[in-house]
Structure formats: structure tokens, C-alpha cells
Image (cartoon, rainbow, N blue to C red):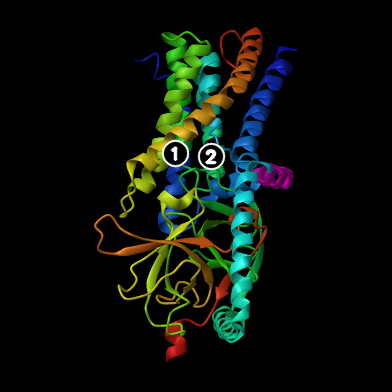
Amino acid sequence: MKAILTKRTIIIFSTALLLAFITIISVNVFNSSGPVTGFANTVTRPVRALATTVASAFGDIFSAIYRYEALEKRNEELVARIAILEANYRAADELAEENNRLRALQGFRERHGGYEHEMASLIGRGSDNFSSTFTINMGYANSKIERGMAVATEEGVLIGQVHDVGAAQSTVITILDTKFSAAAYVGRRDTGDEGDSSATVRGDFTYMRSGLLMLEKFDADLIVRKGDTVITSGIGGVFPAGLIVGEVDVVSRNDSGISRFATVRPLLDLENISLVFVITGFESTEQRDT
Amino acid sequence: MKKKAIVNLILLHALFLVVVYVFQGVIFPYVRFGGFVPLLLPVAVTGIALYEGRYKGGLSGLFAGIFCDISFNQPVGTFTVFLTLVGLGIGTLSDTVVLSGFIAFYIGSAAVLIVSAFIQMLPIIALPHSIPTSIIMGTVIGQTVYSLVLAFPIWFIVRALGKRAERITPSGRIV
């Protein structure tokens, strides 16, 4: 035992413990990933940035080859959808009404033009198979980014939430991650209005690798159909109201058969995003109501 | 001459770990196979510890752990401590009872990868929503098998590094 616990062994292990201790203190007391993580990220950043550029280009090619079958299936689905749309086109009035309603739902940019935001580039993706994260090139030293802020695309599609802020880079959990949860509502209802029925949309590990998330806790009488739009409600003040999360994919009942849930497909392929907007300020639903 | 060789050896180990980090943390997240990203840094630490003993294994584990944590986009800590322990532990076994070789490397890598996957899944298990065990185990198995496939080329490299180190510093002391 004495031969195993030599001075060097103790020094090496103590160093690891010290680094972990510094991080634990930083995370819990200062709400930051800490100097060790910051230093490690800074040192590896040039390598990461260069490799990301190469990997991104290579990944696009690989992705196209690997997902050929999926794309083919998706293509067939889209062809079928076009046929349905052509049939619907004949009912022009109905389509116009539907169109107006969708425009109203998606026209959040006009309704919520007061967002303050910071533009950021994606510089890396997490390699953990149990979470869904990416890093952006903005931190507390070069922006107003803070933990918990919403991350969206230019079109206002919600893609994640800032989870950890470093000096010059931040970690974002995507909407697929199990730590993500937001108050939302289903945009398309029989009444046509936005409604006051709230639901919760959250990342679920069961669906994460399929690129889906889960909508739950909605009213029993709410009609939810495939293709309905899921939009943040702004309740709770964490996310601004009106950001599109995705479209309803499949509606199911849970194991007990009492309540329903739906899987939601993000509007964008989260694997192919390079530019994002962090919403650093917005008028919350409660503030607007008062 | 020997001093220069030792410096070169340290640089080679550092370069090896950086390259493994780039593959695990940057390249493979963009080219997922079956939706999985392989874990290569724990495999590299297992190999270095097995061929070069506890000190180099422990030091490699320390740095590989930091790389592993930042490749997961999480604060430095969990894997820094875990991989340091792996390096020291497997290195000690290698110094005392276990013979370094392909089978020992693969068994050691598989064990370390499974424990790594369980550490990774801890935050998921802590969630209030129940997740089917089959889904979690599917991810553990997928990640481990994929990593073990890619452990094969890593074995050649750690073996070559080990032989080079043996020629320069048979005692295992590099500093």
C-alpha cells in the first residue's frame, strides 16, 4: 500500500481534486464555470475553431450520405404533402383563412420587435451522448449574455438556452436536452386564436437522439394535431413569448392512459446551425399585461 | 541527448492527447455514426497507463480528463478526477499484477468506458421524469461499442509510444 501511495501519486491525484474543487466553488458560489474551465477552453479554442471548420464541411458530406435513406423518405412525405396542398388549393377561401392565421402566429417579429439580442457564432458541439449542447463565441467579457437566456435563430425559432457563461464563450443546451423546459402553447386551435391554454415543452432523453422533444401538461380538451405549431407562451418570464419551438409530430397517451403528450419536431435541423441570436432583453408577458 | 529525447516524448504524448481530443470533441460530434459520438480519451488514458505505468498514466489522465470535460461542454471536474484515478489505478495494476497487452487493453478500456457512461448518465437518472432503462442502456451500449471499435487504432499508437518511452526511460521517470 505504501508503495502505491507514493509522493508523486498523491501530488497527481491532489492536483485533479484541487482543479475539481476550484470548479465546484466557482459553479456554486460565483455561478460561473471557473478559471480552470475558462483557461482550458481558451487554450483549446484555436484548435477547436480550426477543427470545427474542417469537421463542419466534412460533416455536411457525411450527413448527406448517411441520411440518404431518411432524406429519400422525407422527400416522399413532402411529395405526398404537396399533393394534399394542391387539393387544398382549390378551396381558396379556406386556405386564405388558414394562411392568415398562420401568418398571425408566425408574425412574432412584428409583435415582439423589441427584443435585445447578441449575435453569436457556433464554435463547437458537445460530444456527450447523454446531453445536447453547443458552444458559442460570446461570454461575459464580450457580451451581455447571462445564464438562462433564450437562444434563437434570426427567424425567431427557439433552439436553446444559455447554460454556462465563460469569459469569451458560453455553453448552450439545445431544446432537445433533458435540462431544457419551457412554457408553451399550441398555436393552431379550432378557435383560431392563440388561446390561454398553457403546456410545457421539454427535452426528453427518450426522443433526444431522434431529434424530437416532448409537449405535455396541456388541457384535456385541447385539440392537438400533427403539424400544429408549438410556441413559447412567455409564462414564467424565462423565455420571451412567441418564439417557435417546432411542430407537433405524434400525439400519444402516456402509460397510465390518463394524460396525453405529443412529440415535437424542431423547425430547423439543429445539426446545421452556425449563427444564433441570444435574446438578452425582452418585455415579459406579465410586464406587457400590466 | 537523453534530455532532448525525454522532451520529445512528453511532446509526443501531449500531441497524441490533443489529437484524440480533437477527434472526440470536435470531429466526431459532426460525423455521428448511428447518432453516437465515441469516447476516445478514456481509451487513450487506459492505454498509456497500461503501457507506461501509474505516473504517466495519472498525468495523462489529468490532462485527458480536462479535455474530456470541455469536450462535453461541462465545467472541468468530474472526468478530470475520474480519468486521473483511471490512469493511476490502471497504471498501478500494470506496474504490479497485470501484463500490458491487447486483451488487457481491451478489457480495461471496456470497463473504463462502461463506468464513464454511467458517470455521464447520472444527471439523467436524477431527473424527475422516468426514462426507460432500455433507452439508457441502448445509449451506454452504443457508445461503448462504437468507442471500442475505434480503440483499435489507439492501441497501435499507445503501444508505439510505450515502446519508445521504454527505450528512453526504462524506469518510467520522464520528469
Report if residue A47 lies within the magenta region: yes
Q: Do the residues bearing badges 1 and 2 touch, measured as CB atoms within 8 Å?
A: yes
Which residue does the image show at 67% across and 20% down from the upper left? B9
Main SS of residues in magenta: helix
Secondary structure found at label 1: helix
Q: Is residue B132 left or right of residue B94?
A: left
| Chain of the residue under label 2 | B
Q: Amino acid at mark 1?
A: Thr
Disc 2, SS: loop
What chain does mark 1 sit on?
A: B
Residue B129 image point, x, y percent: 32, 54
In this view of the protein, which residue sits in the foreground, B174 or A94?
Answer: A94
- The residue under label 1 is B139
Q: Is residue A279 visible?
A: yes
Task: Name the residue located 46 percent from the left edge and 47 percent from the top edge.
Answer: A23
Quadrant of the snapshot with the N terminus of chain A: top left
Which residue position is annotated with label 2?
B36
Tell me the magenta residue range: A43-64
CA separation in Å, label 1 and label 2: 8 Å
Residue A244 x, y percent position in the rendering: 53, 71
A127 w.r.t. A229: above or below = above
Picture quadrant of residue B118 = top left
Measured along the vertical axis of the image, is residue A168 above or below residue A68? below
Q: Amino acid at mark 2?
A: Phe
Q: Is residue A62 magenta?
A: yes
Task: Using the rendered view, name the quadrant where residue A275 is placed.
Answer: bottom right
